[in-house]
Image: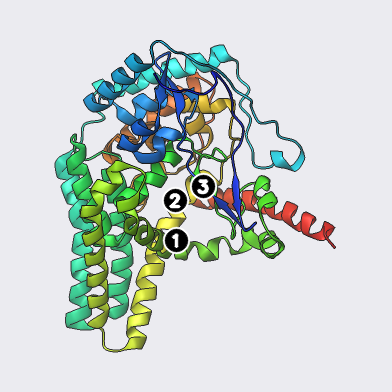
Amino acid sequence: AHKRREQTITRRSLFTQSGGTMVIRDIDHSPFWLKIDGRWVYVDESVMKAHPGGSAITTYRNKEATTVFHTFHGSSIVAGKWLAKLKEESKDEQPTIKDVEDELKGDDKINMGTFDITQEKADEIAKAFDKLRMDLRKEGYYQSDLMWYFRKCLEPIFMIALAVYLQVYHGQYFIAALLMGLSWQQLGWYMHECCHQQVFKNPYYNDLLSYFTGDLLQGFSSSGWKEQHNIHHAATNVLGRDGDLDLLPFYATVVQDLKLVDNWVLNMLPYQHIYWTFLLPLLRLSWLTSSITFVVGMPNNFYDVYKKKAAYEQPLLALHWTLVLYQLYLLPDWSTRMTFFLVSQLLGGFLLAHVVTYNHYSTVKFPYNAKILSNYPCLQIYTTRNMQPSPFIDWLWGGLNYQIEHHLFPTMPRHSLPKVMPRVKEFCEEHDIPYLVDDYITGWLLGLEQFGNVAKVAKKRLASMF
């Protein structure tokens, strides 16, 4: 029999601090429960280690997870067998779990949202969303167009080939660097879709394609991306769960972050809304560094899936950097090499960052144990902003201007998102849920406003120290 902890569990926010300057996201690997289809199932260390999605399984620790489970796994036979086995193993022991929702006071309410609808209304929305999701699947919107994805894969490869041609045969180094940056951005969207299992029905083929378009062609770890991004999708803008909110020491997304910083960081944060935009081009370099760190550590990772995938990702990432260095070697001098490297990397970083920072940093956040966490559709819609669509934006943004639709249906192919947008708008109108869509300048300014709100508190607290 399992040696299980007390049957009554109280949950509170969990943050750890290192040196007083960084928020460290340590994944808790202790056993826990998940409530799926009205039944609590027990998740121990052996289940976690074998989970193909890594730490995403821990995101709803001791929470209702029915909708998020079925949204992420769709009609997966493997996931269904796992769930059936866990239900059978847990049938004789069902816990009583009490939620303690965080009470926010004073400045801690800044940038934070509220979700105070009745449980009856919340259940109605969840049920209606499940119906919508199943209807869209039956109507074929989850069906991938393989020729469309083949063309989308060729586009950035053609850009790289053109960049090399212009560099080697015509000496057009600046134009070649711009093309490399643009190709890396477009490859980022493609890897993103492979990791969400959008291209093929078989996850193995999606993984292989993500290694090619991610690790090899652009230097981003497929597994490292999944480890972080799936958690973000499961608990978008939830403090202590969504790692995308952990931007210290350079940025504080909420006032609560100010409790975790030293004076030197506090001196910087009153200006974060000013330098926010100027540092966006550094995003690609940050992700490249994180990818190297993650891939090097894959053989010793807690999760079995990453240990196995190290055999694919380590040589491909090494080959990527070999090709990058060789391309730089072909340039005539060190000044040109440095310029080429910075232009291509910083442009690629800005093209990625101006998209991925738009959708969520401009919307409200929620505390660790917020009630909305148990209502998947409301959480995704409240915390996500769409960008006004157009043929050019659809291409440049890789479909992430339909971010609400993507977060509601993460495994749905990109080419279906504009088609289901009217259905999602109708769903929101029927259930009185705000559907956020704006032009870029408006969304960008709203994001700056949120950082500015925290900057004002940081300035006030700094002044009170003297």
Label 1 secondary element = helix
Q: Earlier in the sequence, mark 2 or mark 1?
A: 1
Any mark on residue 356, and which? Answer: 2
Q: Residue at x 60, y 23 (%)?
A: 99
State the residue at coordinates (58%, 50%).
Answer: 447
Secondary structure category for the residue under label 3: loop
Label 1: how many Cα within 10 Å (few below 14, some 14–19, many 20+): many
Residue 244 picture location, percent across and down: 49, 47
In this orientation, which residue lies closer to the viewer: 403 or 420?
403
- Hey, what amino acid is under mark 2? Val
Is residue 304 shown above or below 91?
below
Q: Residue at x 26, y 76 (%)?
A: 325
Q: Nearer the viewer, residue 105 or 433?
A: 105
Decide: is 390 above or below 48. below
- Residue 165 placed where, x, y %? 17, 75
* Residue corresponding to mark 3: 25
Determine if residue 439 is in view.
no
Q: Nearer the viewer, mark 3 or mark 2?
A: 3
Q: Secondary structure at mark 2?
A: helix
In the foreground, 293 or 163: 293
N-terminal label among 3 and 1: 3
Quadrant assignment, res 265 = bottom right
Q: Residue 366 vs residue 4: left or right?
A: right
Q: Residues within 10 Å of mark 3 (few under 14, many from 20)?
A: some
Label 1 sits on what residue type? Leu
Compared across the picture, whether 307 is left or right of 362 comes to: left
Query: Which residue is denoted by mark 1 in the rendering?
Result: 283
Distance Cα–Cα, label 3 vs label 1 = 19 Å
Amino acid identity at mark 3: Arg
- Residue 83 sits above or below residue 106 on the image: above
Relative side of 464 to 431, left or right: right
